Image (cartoon, grey):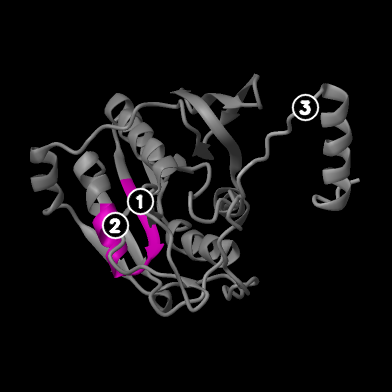
């Protein structure tokens, strides 16, 4: 079974966001594998160990993203592909186009990715990629069983569970609860240094159609600081009157 994992390198979720000139500063920031993509890597390795085959991890990102691919290789993936995006303006549309051009001529049974990236949180790339490749897709999965060319999948449905059976090939996106990602072992880290890393540029790819970004970020800003709450005193009827007055005069919601 050949499995492809699409991953993204993101800010460490513990990092403090600092804005400089309207953009997020990356000075001194630690980058990690997008947490949802870790579930995808873990599930791919488990499927490979159960059914045989190999796991290829793919990313579109700057040179620093290679470290996240090495982490995935240390976890147990077999090989990696990085498409350099250092000079590119990307959005979900263009990333899906680039990933499709990398994957379309490769043999695969399953493509795994995270449900969303914790930086932009759009959750679009997986679905767009499946459409580009014209294959079935199931999102926000929490269980995946594969047998005889079919996958039986459980997916999160906002407090309920939906069970889906679908024929391979398929693209699925991983949600928290699918598994518990492993930590790279020391032997795994040493082996990862010798595993193949394919480096590509957009010029190396045959992209179907226009891959230019269709959207652009026009402004980035932090949310306003929350003011301290106010405690009303006195009798209940008086508190209600004061509350109504405050909602009308200060909050301006009535």
Residue closest to the eye, 8 or 194: 8
Query: Horizontal and vertical percent for residue 152?
Result: 54, 22
Mark closest to the chain's N terminus, 1 or 2: 1
Residue pointed to by mark 1 = 12
Residue closest to the eye, 133 or 29: 29
The residue at 12%/54% (across/down) is 193
Looking at the image, do the residues carrying marks 1 and 2 touch, with CB atoms under 8 Å apart?
yes
The tag on residue 234 is 3
Quadrant hosting residue 211? bottom right
Q: Quadrant of the C terminus?
A: top right
Looking at the image, do the residues carrying marks 2 and 3 touch, with CB atoms under 8 Å apart?
no
Indicate left or right for 252 with 49 as reference: right
The residue at 26%/43% (across/down) is 77
Relative height, residue 41 to residue 64 (above, below): above
The residue at 39%/36% (across/down) is 39
Indicate left or right for 152 with 13 as reference: right
Residue range of the region highlighted in magenta in the rendering:
56-69
Q: Secondary structure at mark 1?
A: loop
Binning the other alpha carbons within 10 Å of mark 2 as few (below 14), some (14 to 19) or many (20 upward) gives few
The tag on residue 30 is 2
How far is the residue under mark 1 from the one under mark 3?
47 Å
- Please tell me whether residue 66 belongs to the stretch shown in magenta: yes
Q: Secondary structure at mark 2?
A: loop
How far is the residue under mark 2 from the one under mark 3?
51 Å
Indicate left or right for 81 with 153 as reference: left
Q: Nearer the viewer, mark 1 or mark 3?
A: 3
């Amino acid at each position: 079974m050949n499995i492809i994992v699409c991953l993204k390198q993101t800010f460490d979720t513990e990092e403090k966001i600092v804005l400089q000139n309207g953009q997020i500063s990356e000075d001194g920031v630690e980058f990690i594998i997008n947490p949802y993509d870790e579930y995808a890597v873990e599930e791919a390795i488990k499927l490979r160990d159960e059914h045989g085959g190999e796991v290829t991890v793919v990313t579109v990102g700057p040179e620093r993203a290679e470290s996240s691919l090495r982490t995935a290789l240390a976890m147990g993936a077999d090989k990696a592909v990085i498409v350099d995006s250092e000079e590119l303006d990307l959005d979900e549309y263009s990333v899906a186009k680039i990933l499709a051009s990398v994957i379309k001529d490769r043999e695969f049974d399953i493509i795994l990715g995270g449900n969303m990236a914790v930086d932009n949180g759009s959750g679009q790339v997986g679905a767009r990629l499946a459409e580009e490749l014209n294959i079935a897709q199931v999102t926000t999965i929490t269980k995946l069983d594969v047998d005889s060319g079919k996958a039986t999948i459980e997916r999160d449905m906002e407090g309920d569970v939906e069970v889906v059976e679908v024929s391979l090939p398929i693209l699925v996106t991983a949600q928290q609860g699918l598994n518990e990602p492993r930590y790279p072992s020391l032997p795994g880290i040493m082996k990862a240094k010798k595993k193949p890393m394919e480096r590509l540029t957009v010029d190396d790819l045959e992209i179907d159609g226009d891959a230019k970004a269709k959207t652009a970020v026009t402004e980035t800003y932090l949310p306003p600081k929350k003011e301290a709450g106010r405690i009303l005193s006195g009798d209940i009827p008086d508190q209600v009157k004061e509350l109504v007055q405050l909602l009308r005069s200060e909050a301006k919601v009535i």
